[in-house]
Image (cartoon, coloured by chain):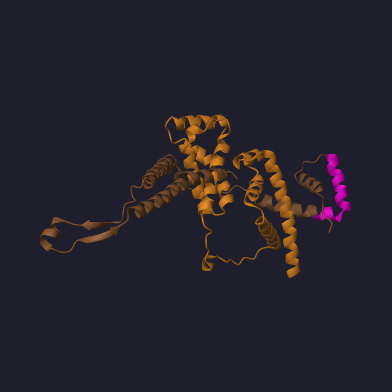
Chain colours: A orange, B brown
Amino acid sequence: MITQQEEYSLIDKILAGDQQPYSILVDGYKSYAFTIAFKILGNRPEAEEAAQDAFIKAFRYLKTFNRTAKFSTWLYRIVFNTAISYKRKSKPAFQRIENTIVEYSDKADKQMERDDKQHYVGKAMESLNEADRLAIQLFYIKEFSLEEVAETMGQNMNTLKVRIHRARLRLGDELKKLLKEEALTL
Amino acid sequence: MKKVSVEKEEQLLRYLDGELDAQTCQSLEEEIQQSELLNTRLEELRLVQSVLVQKARLETPSKNFTQKVMSGLDRNPVASFFTPRKGLLLFFGSLIASGIALALLSAGVFDGPTAPLVLDSPLTTDWLKTPSLSIPFNGKILVNGILILNLALAFVVLDRTVLKPLFQKRASVI
């Protein structure tokens, strides 16, 4: 991980006209940027394009980075806004049935059970609004701090905490409902 | 049907996050053991938590991600011709043009009788001796049409170049 001082010295070099140090910043933050874009867009190729676009935008506007915040949070905000605008432009992709790979695998019971849990929680997640869903997904990624998630989403920390608590309770409710429905159909 | 209170639910979440002190933790655990309702709710929330933790990981982009970004740095951004400034200028220009046309209309410049447009050239009169071709023309109707079109265009320009980007910028902050 790059320290803040190293980051600033890289930024100084980039602003002086040397593009190459930017690759160190891209390498350092590409997974974080891609994850944010992926959580918003839910589609890998589009998320990759949005994250790359965000890095290019960040490079162009690097001189406006005033160093009062961390470079990472400034970058994540750009990624967040870029991914949101990609989401607005994109239409849901149609997946042909013949392109859907159906694999047979002899999974162990434990794996099946885990997949079931994931399936139900995933379904319950659909009931959340976009902002709640994104907040809760980013909150659980240990590499993002609560402060970073709040700044990326342009929200106050307390508001975000409330949002995450509310979303977890809602997920619990939805899960109960789904499992009840499932039990009735059996 | 009985429901767990909001305060208790909050406490359960803090319990799962490990944010409760030892004493509160112990008393809550005793409460959970005695209450089927609390126990069920805790299990639901624990399940949600465990799945979210399992799913929470950093995603890895493609191997040539950095290379693609670096090669895109020199690409010139596609600048839109209609910047908000140009859009506003065009909008006010259209309004001024419409204002002038309206002033002329109200001054009665286009109130004259319908005049035929006579396509009369020396060629047709001197050599071919064919009857002159005339088209009835009403200046007032034409100017009214242009005026309406101009105003509609002005508002489209205002919407596309100023209002839409402004609202998009605001809406990007959820």
Q: Is residue B31 magenta?
A: yes
Quadrant location of the C terminus of chain B in the rendered image:
top right
Q: Position of residue B56 (x, y in %)?
A: 64, 49
Does residue B23 appear in this view? yes
Q: How many marks?
A: 0
- In the picture, the quarter occupied by the N terminus of chain B is bottom right
Residue at the far left in the pictured view: B127
Residue B160 in picture, x, y percent from top left: 46, 48
Q: Is A158 placed left or right of A42 in the picture?
A: right
Query: In this rendering, is residue B2 above or below A58?
Result: below
Magenta residue span? B22-40
Tell me, yes or no, if residue B61 can be seen here. no
- Position of residue B110 measured from the top left corner of the image (x, y, whole percent): 33, 50
Name the residue at the bottom extreme: A186
Residue B132 position, x and y percent, is 19, 61
Q: Which quadrant holds residue B129? A: bottom left
Residue at 57% x, 54% y: name it.
A42
Q: Give the quadrant of residue B76.
A: top left
Is residue A6 rendered to the left or right of residue B34?
left
Q: Is residue B1 above or below residue A33?
A: below
